[in-house]
Amino acid sequence: MKAAEAAGDAGPDFIDLNFGCPVRKIVMKGGGAALLQDIPKMIAMAGAVVKSTKLPVTAKTRLGWDDRHLEIIDIAERLQDAGIRAISIHGRTRTQLYGGKADWTLIGEVKNNPRMTIPVFGNGDIDSGPKAKEMKDRYGVDGILIGRAAVGNPWIFSEVKAFLENGRIPAPPSVNERIKILRLHLEKSFLYKGERATVFEMRKMYSGYFKEIAGFRPFRVKLVTAGSLQEIDSIIQEIEGSGII
């Protein structure tokens, strides 16, 4: 397949097929979680990609399209048979989007299915080190994926890693460290997306970056109404000089 060949030219370690994205604009075009309504097509696509590249191919998906079609056990077996080397499972259906509570029960059943020999990763509602350890220990998954909990909180990964290794939650980052990473985030986003997209998309990040920091609220109001990167930089300088901790 041309897409797999193009991806391979970029030199990745593996190719991941996303059969789990629930976003309407993706699903309406037949992509992402739409394939949960046409499982034979999903399997055929996975097999075609596997055959078209020498790279390992992995896949991510959901429990099923809705509560009446929780077909993940069968899907996982068939993806494995098609040559998929690892599978990541989000513990929600497509119709749930990101609402409700992730159900890890079926993720555990996939992992403990005697037919499954490939690594199985779990995803959904992991927002702390203790929660990651609880899910990993309870369901035996080979690894944990983190999504929304990382929005404005890139330190979640080091927290989870530390807790899994020694059972301790590391000290939260200082305000200076938060600002340093925030500036880097803004810089990289600008280079990739341009100013307008960066200004708007970063508005959902600020609360995470300064979570539980006393005195931040007035600055948040300014940041989410700022209209340019220059204005955002000025506000960040105000935060640096404010003495909030």
Image: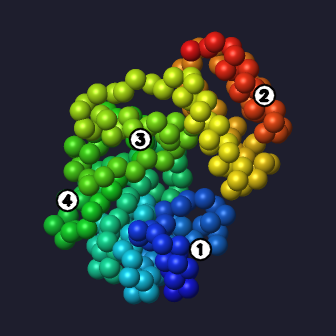
Instruction: Tell me which label, 1 or 4, sits earlier in the chain.
Output: 1
Question: Residue 84 is drawn in which quadrant?
Answer: bottom left
In the rendering, which numbered label is found on residue 234?
2
Q: Residues within 10 Å of mark 2 (few under 14, many from 20)?
A: few
Residue 117 screen position, x and y as percent: 21, 69
- Secondary structure at badge 3 equals helix
CB under 8 Å between discs 1 and 2: no
Question: Residue 54 is drawn in which quadrant?
Answer: bottom left
Residue 173 screen position, x and y as percent: 48, 26
Q: Nearer the viewer, residue 210 or 79?
A: 210
Instruction: Tell me which label, 2 or 3, sits earlier in the chain.
Output: 3
In the rendering, which numbered label is found on residue 30?
1
CB under 8 Å between discs 2 and 3: no
In the rendering, which numbered label is found on residue 105?
none
In the rendered structure, the answer to whether residue 113 lies left or right of residue 54 reads: left
Instruction: Tell me which label, 2 or 4, sits earlier in the chain.
Output: 4
Q: Could you tell me the amino acid type at mark 4?
A: Asn
Q: Residues within 10 Å of mark 1 (few under 14, many from 20)?
A: some
Q: How is the image coloured?
A: rainbow
Q: Could you tell me the amino acid type at mark 3?
A: Phe
Front tag of 2 and 4: 2
Front tag of 2 and 3: 2
**Label 3, on which residue?**
157
Q: CA distance from mark 1 to mark 2?
A: 43 Å
- Secondary structure at badge 4 equals loop
Q: Could you tell me the amino acid type at mark 1?
A: Gly
Front tag of 1 and 2: 2
Is residue 40 shown to the viewer in this render? no
In the rendered structure, the answer to whether residue 101 lies left or right of residue 141 reads: right
Q: CA distance from mark 3 to mark 1?
A: 32 Å
Does residue 83 sit above or below 100 in this rendering?
Answer: below
Is residue 97 shown to the viewer in this render? yes
